[in-house]
């Protein structure tokens, strides 16, 4: 099978599943179709990854698609997490459905939009056209807006409206930045769609007008930064991630933030090439560090469990943004790894959190108690997930954060205390909040339930494995990506 | 049509777009707002066609027709239908008073002018001077979204912002590549359906479209 | 030495004095027709003025010199303003002595003294009218100056003759800055000349009147002068608008034929502007007083946008 065929399947599978699921609606086997579609997508992703591993980066579909070391691992990650989320959501959504929180229409909508969302994210990653990248990003927002408000409670609608408006406005800035990028590119490359192709742009980035590109980067930073959830553009994130159904929270936190950061980093490469200064990096470092510190301190005062982990996502995105801003091989390597392990760990946490809140019918942390005894998988899963996310060895996040810290000490030692402060506060806050939830006796209102084992275990094992041993292909990709992003 | 004449028509239409943007900022009635929005779309589409003619870029005609159908016909129609269905007849409240809003608006225009100065110097297109107006339209749409507290008005502000972006693409580069323009138009259309659904949700849940009531999700202490 | 400029200057002042009442008559006639009433004819304002001149002046006991002096001053400044605006010919001797800022100042002096006179007698209405008038003035004058600066920027001069010359000779039909300035000018003119929707010249209803409240105590020849000056002010604003934004037909050569032709054109433009004025007045309702800030605020906005448009777009 050729690689472009593989790409076609990878992109076409979620789109087809979306259409099929829109017709299937609330039938009994809809979740299974959802899982099947996602699994096929994942298989195609693996195939493509193998192809890229063997033959190196490639262009496909008349230069419209582009796969290199940077986006291939993110594509596989996206396909993988969406598959495990689909598995998780089968049990989870069935229970929500039984409790009447979602109706017929809601379920039909949920499944179709879930697949459409996966499609939008994969398109974001694989497209070579900076304009299409923007369109896909907007599509990813639009497809999840109504999923956030799926429960139709006042708070859910408020959260979705905030998400819709703030992200709409934010991403509009990114479009302006893209227009400016095209303006600069047109001068060098001539007119037409070719001028917006990333491969072409990166080749000529040295001759792009620096003043225009710096201006463009400001807009792109604000635009995509809103989607990454960087402080102070993060207002929508805790709401959107906490009010929707938990599977959606898992993919929003685990995947969509990565995609937005990916877009930002792609743009940064062009800007760096043009300006030959480190200004873009400084901007990203500033936003990143601010996000780490603000999010870490916000963690302390959370009462809602999903909201707390949303803030933790902001913190980790801040770390990755900071590391990309810092530049240099070690920091970039750390950032790439961090995106991967955070995504896995955070979605695992959301899976357990989803079950925990279903067992207690509450997202209020003061009501969630005795998880170890009530349901060992949920309890220990949450515990290990939190241990991973705060950066305890031997989990993968320890490795990535350690790399980033090392690089910070070398390149910007005066920022190390701030970084450590953020990490320390987040560590303390998360442990303080999680410990009473998992330990202790089972409260009377806790209801036992069947949980999805596979996703949680799979994710945690992977995070652990990445902390102990780095597979060869990943090593190669990361090193290539580091070269690419230099 | 000689170049001088064309650039004058272009500037004049840009001025009209700016005028409608300010009009929307101070307009209190929802129907008036929708009409202004439709006018803005009309001027934009006309401008795109003129630029397309002068620069001999045929894909701009498609953009122009797309704008005309989407921003002048479809979206105002959808908004009209929604407002009739939801029986919104109230005047729109503003948070900041109108003279103040105008002053901020003027400041934003000046800001946009300065921000786009480097591009104006680099560009050789006849439309280069209108880029400042385009950015100003974006900023004014943003301002409108911040100062208004009604869901419909916020959406109109959002769409006006989108108009500004489209205008920016036309004036900075004679339009983005067609595939991008089409994709953006598709996104706007999807967004239109989403906010349509949203209006119903908000209306049934909160009994009005005043977004001021949606303030439950705050950081608790 | 060329005598034509001086002839056209004298001719112009005569026109301002002579035709202003007829213009008001024309506006009133149109208004009557639009409302289905029988009009009093084009010449009624002349009859009103001559009737007032024939009557005795009744002065309040505590009227000071300001009260007596004001009508002459208002009349004088208005005639002087009429001498500055180049209506028939660009080459106007008086126009060289005073520029457009002076023109604004002349109107401001007249307004200032009218307001003083309104308060001079000490009646409640006079004071109320003065206070309202000054409120409007404080908002209208910055807008007016802004609009004028925009035009001056476009013409690179504050001299009226120069401005008209530049705009007349330029091929710039669609200059956004001028379009904005024109819109601002229309709004300001309505406020300055006390027309609907800012003020109603035909009312003596105590709650709404502004200009009429200030001159309520005047009678006889004083009132005649003030009324005449008011007519001239409207006439001047209309012709200023016509000449600044639509200077077609103005005499640039300084020949007798040119002046006559310019006169015909002026009459034509005034007739049209009268129609537009009546359309605005019948189309709009008078605004509540506190909404005037918004009205004049938008005039200021337009003028500012005009100035910005000059830098951005021209």
Image (cartoon, coloured by chain):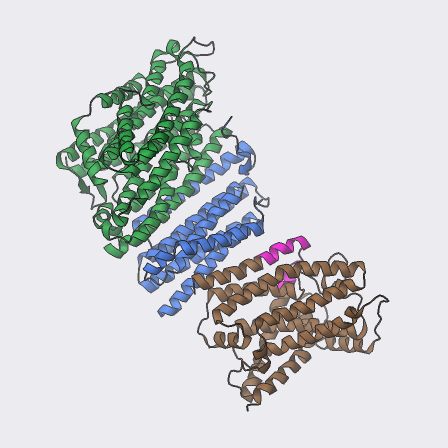
Relative to A78, say whether C94 is above or below. Answer: below
Q: Which residue, as the protein is rendered here, is positioned at the far front?
A: A414
Q: Nearer the viewer, residue A195 or C2?
A: C2
Which secondary structure class fits the magenta region best? helix
Would residue C286 be counted in the magenta stretch?
A: yes
Quarter of the image that includes the N terminus of chain B: bottom left
* Hue used for the chain lettered A: green
Relative depth, front residue between C272 and A304: A304
- Queried whether the magenta region covers residue C288, the answer comes back as yes
Residue C197: name its quadrant.
Answer: bottom right
Image height of A53 relative to A388, above or below: below
Magenta segment: C279-297
The chain whose colour is brown is C
Q: Position of residue C307 (x, y in %)?
A: 49, 62
Which chain is rendered blue in the image? B
Residue C255 position (above or below residue C64): below
Residue appearing at x 44%, y 34% in the figure: A236
């Amino acid at each position: 099978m050729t690689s472009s065929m593989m790409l076609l399947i990878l992109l076409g599978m979620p789109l087809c599943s979306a259409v099929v699921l829109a017709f299937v609606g609330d039938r009994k086997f809809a979740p299974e179709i959802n899982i099947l579609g996602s699994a096929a997508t994942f298989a195609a992703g693996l195939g493509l990854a193998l192809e890229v591993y063997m033959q190196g980066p490639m262009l496909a579909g008349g230069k419209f698609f582009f796969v290199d070391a940077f986006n291939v691992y993110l594509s596989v990650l996206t396909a993988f997490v969406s598959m495990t989320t689909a598995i998780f959501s089968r049990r989870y959504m069935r229970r929500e459905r039984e409790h009447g929180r979602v109706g017929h229409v809601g379920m039909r909508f949920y499944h179709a939009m879930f697949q459409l969302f996966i499609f939008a994210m994969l398109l974001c990653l694989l497209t070579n056209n900076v304009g299409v990248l923007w369109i896909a990003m907007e599509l990813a927002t639009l497809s999840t807006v109504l999923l956030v408000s799926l429960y139709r409670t006042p708070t859910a609608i408020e959260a979705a409206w905030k998400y819709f408006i703030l992200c709409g406005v934010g991403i509009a800035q990114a479009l302006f930045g893209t227009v400016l990028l095209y303006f600069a590119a047109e001068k060098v490359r001539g007119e037409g769609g070719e001028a917006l192709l990333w491969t072409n742009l990166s080749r000529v980035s040295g001759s792009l007008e620096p003043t225009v590109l710096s201006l463009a980067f400001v807009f792109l930073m604000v635009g995509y930064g809103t989607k990454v959830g960087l402080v102070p553009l993060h207002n929508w994130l805790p709401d959107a991630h906490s009010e929707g159904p938990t599977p959606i929270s898992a993919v929003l936190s685990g995947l969509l933030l990565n995609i937005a950061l990916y877009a930002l980093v792609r743009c940064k490469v062009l800007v760096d090439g043009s300006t030959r200064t480190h200004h873009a990096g400084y901007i990203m470092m500033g936003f990143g560090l601010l996000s780490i510190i603000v999010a870490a301190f916000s963690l302390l005062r959370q009462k809602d469990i999903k909201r707390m982990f949303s803030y933790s996502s902001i913190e980790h995105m801040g770390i990755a943004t900071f590391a990309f801003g810092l530049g240099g091989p070690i920091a970039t390597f750390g950032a790439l790894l961090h995106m991967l392990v955070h995504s896995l760990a955070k979605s695992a946490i959301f899976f357990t959190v989803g079950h925990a809140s279903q067992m207690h019918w509450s997202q209020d942390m003061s009501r969630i108690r005795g998880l170890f005894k009530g349901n060992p998988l949920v309890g220990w899963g949450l515990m290990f997930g939190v241990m991973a996310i705060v950066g305890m060895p031997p989990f993968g996040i320890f490795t990535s954060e350690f790399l980033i810290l090392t690089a910070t000490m070398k390149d910007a030692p005066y920022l190390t205390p701030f970084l450590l402060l953020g990490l320390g506060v987040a560590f303390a806050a998360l442990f303080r909040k999680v410990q009473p939830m998992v330990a202790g006796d089972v409260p009377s209102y806790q209801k036992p339930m069947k949980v999805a084992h596979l996703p949680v275990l799979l994710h945690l094992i992977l995070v652990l494995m990445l902390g102990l041993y780095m597979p060869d292909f990943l090593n190669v990709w990361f090193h290539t990506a580091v070269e690419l992003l230099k | 049509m000689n170049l001088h004449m064309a650039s004058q028509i272009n500037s004049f239409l840009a001025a009209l777009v700016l005028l409608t943007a300010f009009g929307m900022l101070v307009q209190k009635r929802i129907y008036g707002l929708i009409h202004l929005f439709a006018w803005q779309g009309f001027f934009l589409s006309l401008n795109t066609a003129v630029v397309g003619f002068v620069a001999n870029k045929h894909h701009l005609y498609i953009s122009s027709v797309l704008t005309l159908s989407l921003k002048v016909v479809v979206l105002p129609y959808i908004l009209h239908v929604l407002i009739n269905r939801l029986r919104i007849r109230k005047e729109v409240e503003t948070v900041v008073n109108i003279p103040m809003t105008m002053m901020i608006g003027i400041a934003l225009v000046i800001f946009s002018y300065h921000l786009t100065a480097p591009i104006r110097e680099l560009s050789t297109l006849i439309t280069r001077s209108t880029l400042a107006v385009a950015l100003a339209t974006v900023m004014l749409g943003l301002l409108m979204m911040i100062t208004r507290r009604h869901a419909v008005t916020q959406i109109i502000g959002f769409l006006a912002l989108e108009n500004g972006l489209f205008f920016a693409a036309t004036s900075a580069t004679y339009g983005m590549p067609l595939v991008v323009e089409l994709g953006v138009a598709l996104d706007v259309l999807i967004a239109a359906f989403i906010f349509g659904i949203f209006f119903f949700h908000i209306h049934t849940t909160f009994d009005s479209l005043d977004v001021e009531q949606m303030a439950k999700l705050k950081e608790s202490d | 030495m060329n005598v034509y400029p001086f002839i056209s200057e004298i001719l112009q002042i005569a026109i301002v004095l002579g035709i202003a009442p007829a213009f008001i008559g024309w506006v009133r006639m149109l208004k009557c027709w639009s409302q289905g009433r029988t009009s009093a004819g084009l010449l009624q304002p002349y009859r009103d003025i001559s009737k007032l001149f024939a009557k005795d002046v009744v002065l309040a006991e505590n009227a000071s010199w300001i009260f007596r002096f004001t009508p002459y001053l208002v009349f004088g400044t208005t005639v002087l303003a009429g001498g500055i605006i180049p209506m028939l010919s660009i080459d106007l001797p008086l126009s060289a002595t005073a520029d457009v800022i002076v023109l604004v100042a002349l109107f401001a002096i007249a307004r200032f003294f009218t307001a003083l006179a309104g308060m001079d007698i000490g009646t409640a209405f006079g004071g109320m009218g003065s206070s309202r008038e000054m409120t409007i003035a404080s908002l209208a004058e910055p807008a007016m100056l802004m609009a004028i600066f925009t035009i001056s920027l476009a013409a690179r001069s504050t001299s009226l003759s120069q401005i008209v010359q530049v705009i007349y000779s330029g091929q710039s039909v669609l200059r956004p800055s001028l379009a904005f300035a024109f819109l601002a000018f229309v709004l300001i003119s309505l406020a300055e000349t006390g027309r609907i929707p800012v003020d109603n010249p035909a009312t003596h209803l105590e709650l709404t009147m502004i200009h009429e409240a200030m001159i309520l105590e005047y009678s006889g020849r004083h009132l005649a002068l003030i009324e005449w000056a008011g007519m001239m002010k409207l006439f001047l604003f209309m012709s200023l608008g016509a000449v600044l934004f639509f200077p077609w037909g103005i005499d640039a050569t300084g020949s007798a034929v040119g002046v006559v032709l310019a006169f015909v054109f002026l009459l034509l433009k005034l007739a049209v502007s009268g129609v537009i004025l009546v359309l605005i007045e019948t189309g709009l309702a008078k605004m509540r007083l506190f909404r005037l800030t918004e009205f004049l605020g938008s005039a200021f906005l337009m003028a500012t946008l005009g100035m910005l448009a000059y830098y951005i777009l021209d």
